[in-house]
Image (cartoon, grey):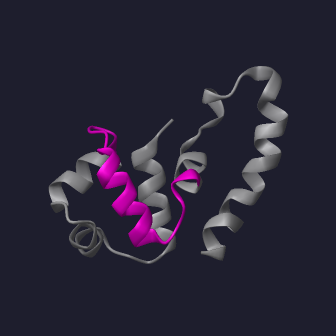
Amino acid sequence: MDLGKAIKEIRKRKCINQKDFAVMCGISSNSLCQIEKGNNHPKKSTIKKVCEVLDIPQSYLLFYSIESEDVPKDKQAIFHALSGIRDLLIDKH
């Protein structure tokens, strides 16, 4: 699971630059950078604020952060089928 990568991808899809996004989330640009690089894990309160700013439910962010290697081999086909709709979930919000 790569929560930082998911935050970065969704932030970019929403065309929000890193500096502005950090301000909107109430964290420093450095903190956001460390989160997006995977060096730090965000607090629950930060995840909540990130989702508010991105206008998505927390469950979408968590789903978006699941990577193929996180899924058992026998569930890979289902995961890949569901992965096709993840961008649609983000774009709808």
Q: Position of residue 13 (x, y in %)?
A: 51, 71
Occupied quadrant, residue 27:
bottom left
Which residue is more in the foreground, 25 or 33? 25
Name which residue lies at 16% across and 55% down: 30
Tell me: residue 26, above or below residue 33. below
Tell me: residue 13, above or below residue 80. below
Locate residue 21 relative to residue 78 in the image: left or right: left
Q: Position of residue 1 (x, y in %)?
A: 51, 35
Q: Position of residue 65 (x, y in %)?
A: 53, 45
Residue 48: in magenta span: yes
Q: Quadrant of the C terminus?
A: bottom right
Which residue is more in the foreground, 53 or 74? 53
The stretch of residues the image draws in magenta is: 37-59
Name which residue lies at 29% across and 44% down: 43
Name which residue lies at 73% across and 50% down: 83
Occupied quadrant, residue 12:
bottom left
Residue 29: in magenta span: no
Locate residue 68 relative to residue 3 in the image: left or right: right
Main secondary structure along the magenta-highlighted residues: helix
